[in-house]
Every structure is written in C-alpha cells, then in structure tokens.
Image (tube, helix red, strand yellow):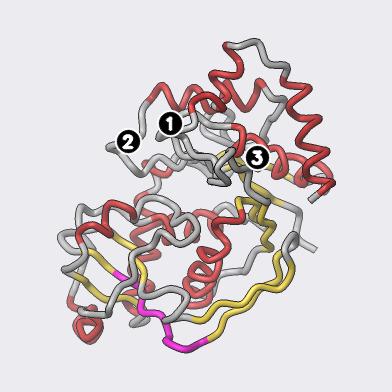
Amino acid sequence: MRTYRGRLAPSPTGYLHLGHARTFWVAHHRARSAHGKLVFRNEDLDYQRCKPEFVSAMYEDLRWIGLDWDEGPDVGGLFGPYSQSQRRKVYLECWRRLRDGGFIYPCSCSRKDLDRALQAPHEDDEIPYPGTCREKIVAAGDWDAPAGISWRFKVPDGERIAFNDLKFGKQHFTAGSDFSDFLVWRRDDIPAYQLAVVADDEAMQITEIVRGADLLKSTARQLFLIRALRYSEPAYFHCPLLRDERNLRLAKRHDALSLRTLRSQGANPAELTRNFVQEVNRN
C-alpha cells in the first residue's frame, strides 16, 4: 500500500469561509488518522484575483483552527514548488502529452468560458460547449506551445465513467451529456483548473483527494484526463456542503462567515472544530 498523501488546496482569491474550514479540517483529520502526509498547495493561477493578503490569510486562518501540514510553500518539501504560479513546466509537459496523444484541440470560441476556466466549476455552472472547433484536433500536433488560443479536452461522447466516492458511494456520469469538452488551457497562456490539479496531484503523489461535493462532476472530467495521461487514480472523498439560510452553498462572498471575520469577532476555534466533528459524524 502507498503511504497516504492528502492535500489542502485553497485558492487565494478571497478569505476562506466556514465551509472551506470544514472541508480542510476533514482532509487534515483523514491524513492524520491514516498516519500519512498532508500537502498544502497554493492554487494561485488566477493572477487577476489572487492577492498576497489572501495568501497570508490562508496560512494564518487555517492554523487558527488547529490545522498543520507537512509540505507546502511555507514549510518546503520534496515535491515543490507548492504554488501553482511556479509550476508552469509541469503543466506544459502535461499539455504536450495530451497534444501528442490527440486528446485535446485548439479552440477559438467561448470567451466567456475562459473566465471560468481557472476556477473549479462548482455544481452545474459550466457553460456547455457545442463542439464548434472539434475538427481542429487533426492539426493539434502543429502547435509547439499552447499560447494564443484556448485548448479543450475532447470527451468521448456517450462514454460512462464511474468512481466510488468514499463519502457518497458509487457515482456515474456520461461524457457529452453530463458535461461537454472542457478547457485545459486558456488563450492567455494559463492552464485551466482541471489540467493543473490533475498534473499537481500526480506530481505530488496525492493518494486521496478531499473536497466539496460540488466537485463530484469535476472528478469525472479529471478521471478522463488521468486516464489519457496514464496517471495513478487517487481515491476521492467529497464532503457535504455547508449552505446558508437560502440553501445556497457558502462562497467567498459570505464575509460574515469568513474565518477572518469570525476571528475578529472572538470566535472559539475549538468550538468550531467540535461542530465539524458532530456534522461529519451526522452526515
């Protein structure tokens, strides 16, 4: 059996909220219970929204609720660098392998979709792609670099993909109906979320991914990438989402529930984590 390796992978585009804290607490708990390693990865590719103050706040706020990690930008480790903005070579190699295998194609449409490509596509907010540029896959090998145009993964329409989630059980999705050809590289020469996390999880030897249930469909997309690249498939544990009074998932716009605000109001971190234990056991 491989040594357990989990990860915390926040994006510094705002202050972390209570929902983030619970998911990261679960990741920490599972890593420590397995006597494994926990990696902190700073997912800072969205250069327009990521800010230094959010980076420092991530470390401070997560340590405030009692979390620690074995590897990361602030503590080092064998698999660095641990900030995505410094890992371009890894992503380019991944892109080349997908290009050479005929799995991706250059796409010149859906500019609005590009704005979302750096972010995890929570729940059903991905814009369906009609396949306008699919025929370009035959000329993909003519490209030496991804810059100047966006790139999509050509999903095998009608193929069913399944995985066993350690929280929600067996999951099934069908390519082409549950999701369409998805972006792996933006025309402004930045890798999209799906490619970056797959490349990093493989390079950092992550064995289990703990994240929110809104990313179940992203797991299906990423499994197609993993299989195309012949990477090792990690295990998955998707946490139930914390929701507000309108039953909407918490987001960074919920400043009243940000860890930074709770800290300033004198909240007790031990009480918060006790609630996490109760909620996780109940769910």
- The picture quadrant where one finds residue 68 is top right
First in residue order: circle 3 vs circle 1: 1
- The picture quadrant where one finds residue 33 is top right
Separation of marks 3 and 2 at Cα, in angstroms: 21 Å
Mark 3: few, some, or many residues within 10 Å (few <14, many ≥20)?
A: many
Q: Are marks 1 and 2 in contact (CB under 8 Å)?
A: yes
Q: Are marks 3 and 2 in contact (CB under 8 Å)?
A: no
User: Going 61% across and 77% down the picture, which residue do you hit?
Assistant: 172
Q: How many marks?
A: 3
- Position in image of residue 142 (x %, y %): 18, 77
Compared with residue 257, is residue 161 higher up or lower down, i.e. above or below?
Answer: below
Determine which residue is flagged by label 3.
24
**Amino acid type at mark 1:** Gly
Please state if 121 lies on the left or on the right of 61 as rendered: left
Determine which residue is flagged by label 2.
49
User: Going 43% across and 85% down the picture, which residue do you hit?
Assistant: 156
Q: Give the magenta range.
A: 152-159
Separation of marks 3 and 1 at Cα, in angstroms: 16 Å
Q: Secondary structure at mark 1?
A: loop
Determine which residue is flagged by label 1.
14
- Position in image of residue 200 (x %, y %): 50, 54
Within the magenta stretch, is there residue 157? yes
Query: Among all residues in the image, which is located at the extreme front?
Result: 246
- Position in image of residue 123 (x %, y %): 50, 58
